[in-house]
């Protein structure tokens, strides 16, 4: 089985409820969304070559041509996993669920080695999630807000259609995972109505999910982050219906890692 791989590296989880925990990142290529604040736009298209870290956490990489087999990806990961204990393997992207068969195979093999499997996804491919879910411990899904995100198929400058229906269908599957995290990236363009719609859907479909409000990290076309007052106000809005709501900024940019 072949897959398109962007990189494999060892680092610290930089966002969400498990921030600060040692993680092996397996980043797959290709994404069907375009986020204004995306800090990995090189993953939007399948990669011609993949970066493979040689020494865990040292940023020392070699390159190899795509496509990869699952076995080859596991072999490249083995020295990193052996060098230091990792609490998670994160399957990320791009959008890993665009490669569901490979994602399921990777998750199953890494899980057999004793790692918890963290799936980082934009949360719109429910059928693919159903295929992968038996091998996943944590589903971390974004709730994309149309004020800052468009589909690849939508022209630049067009008003994006809301993602709420697709996210709701995805969350109905994701709630079967052992743990589920719903993340909203908040920018200066984020509206109360968008946040309220996400809040109400999560409260209805999966009230036990952890919800993370992530103030945007300035990058690309986004130059400012929302104020502390704005984040506190949004936290209060979500807490009207949800118990586990956290404001957690990205930490990995502090270390120069994207």
Image: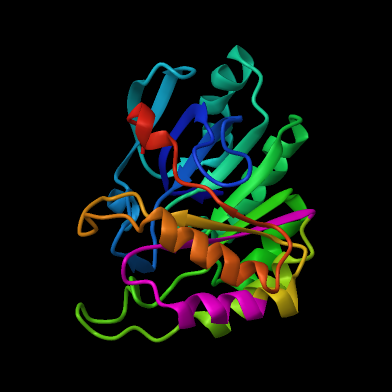
- The quadrant the C terminus occupies is top left
Q: How is the image coloured?
A: rainbow
Instruction: Please report the residue visible at 55 percent of the width from the left and 27 percent of the height from the top.
Output: 77
In the picture, measured across the screen, residue 249 lies left or right of residue 241, that is left
Question: In the visual, does 192 lie left or right of 196?
Answer: left
**In the displayed structure image, the side of residue 236 where residue 227 appears, left or right:** left
Choose top left, top right, bottom left or bottom right for residue 240.
Answer: bottom right
Quick check: is 194 in the magenta stretch? Answer: yes
Q: Is residue 169 visible?
A: no
User: For residue 59, what is the image quadrant?
Assistant: top left
Which residue is most to the front? 229
Q: Position of residue 115 (x, y in %)?
A: 71, 33
- Residue drawn at the location 61% of the way across and 30% of the way down: 21
Q: Nearer the viewer, residue 92 or 65?
A: 92
What residue is rendered at 72% in x and 44% in y? Answer: 108
Q: Position of residue 87 (x, y in %)?
A: 68, 30
Q: Is residue 98 magenta?
A: no
Q: Is residue 122 above or below residue 28?
A: below
Any part of residue 230 in sight: yes
Q: Is residue 134 left or right of residue 181?
A: right
Residue 226 coordinates in the image, percent (x, y): 35, 58
Q: Is residue 237 positioned above or below 187 on the image?
A: below
Query: Which residue is found at the position 61% from the left and 15% from the top?
Result: 84
* Residue 222 in the image, given as x and y percentages of width and height: 24, 58
- Disc tally is 0
Which stretch did the figure color magenta? 178-201
Q: Nearer the viewer, residue 35 or 214?
A: 214
Whether residue 18 is situated above or below residue 151 in the rendered picture: above
Q: Which quarter of the picture shows residue 60?
A: top left
């Amino acid at each position: 089985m072949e897959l398109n791989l962007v990189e494999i590296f060892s680092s610290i989880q930089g966002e969400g409820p498990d921030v600060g925990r040692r993680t092996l990142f397996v980043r797959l290529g290709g994404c069907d969304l375009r986020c204004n604040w995306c800090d990995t736009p090189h993953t939007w298209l399948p990669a011609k070559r993949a970066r493979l870290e040689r020494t865990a956490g040292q940023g020392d990489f070699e390159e190899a041509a795509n496509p990869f087999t699952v076995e080859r990806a596991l072999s490249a990961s083995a020295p990193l996993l052996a060098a230091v204990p990792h609490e998670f393997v994160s399957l990320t992207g791009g959008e890993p669920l665009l490669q569901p068969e490979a994602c399921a195979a990777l998750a199953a093999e890494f899980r057999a080695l004793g790692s918890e499997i963290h799936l980082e996804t934009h949360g719109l491919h429910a059928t693919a999630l159903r295929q992968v879910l038996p091998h996943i411990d944590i589903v971390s899904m974004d709730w994309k807000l149309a004020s800052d995100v468009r589909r690849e198929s939508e022209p630049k400058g067009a008003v994006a259609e809301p993602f709420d229906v697709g996210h709701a269908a995805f969350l109905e599957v994701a709630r079967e995972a052992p743990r589920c995290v719903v993340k909203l990236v908040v920018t200066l363009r984020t509206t109360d109505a968008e946040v309220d719609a996400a809040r109400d859907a999560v409260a209805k479909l999966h009230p036990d999910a952890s919800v993370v409000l992530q103030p945007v990290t300035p990058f690309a076309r986004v130059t400012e982050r929302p104020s502390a007052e704005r984040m506190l106000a949004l936290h209060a809005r979500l807490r009207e219906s949800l118990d586990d709501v956290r404001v957690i900024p990205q930490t990995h940019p502090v270390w120069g890692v994207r």
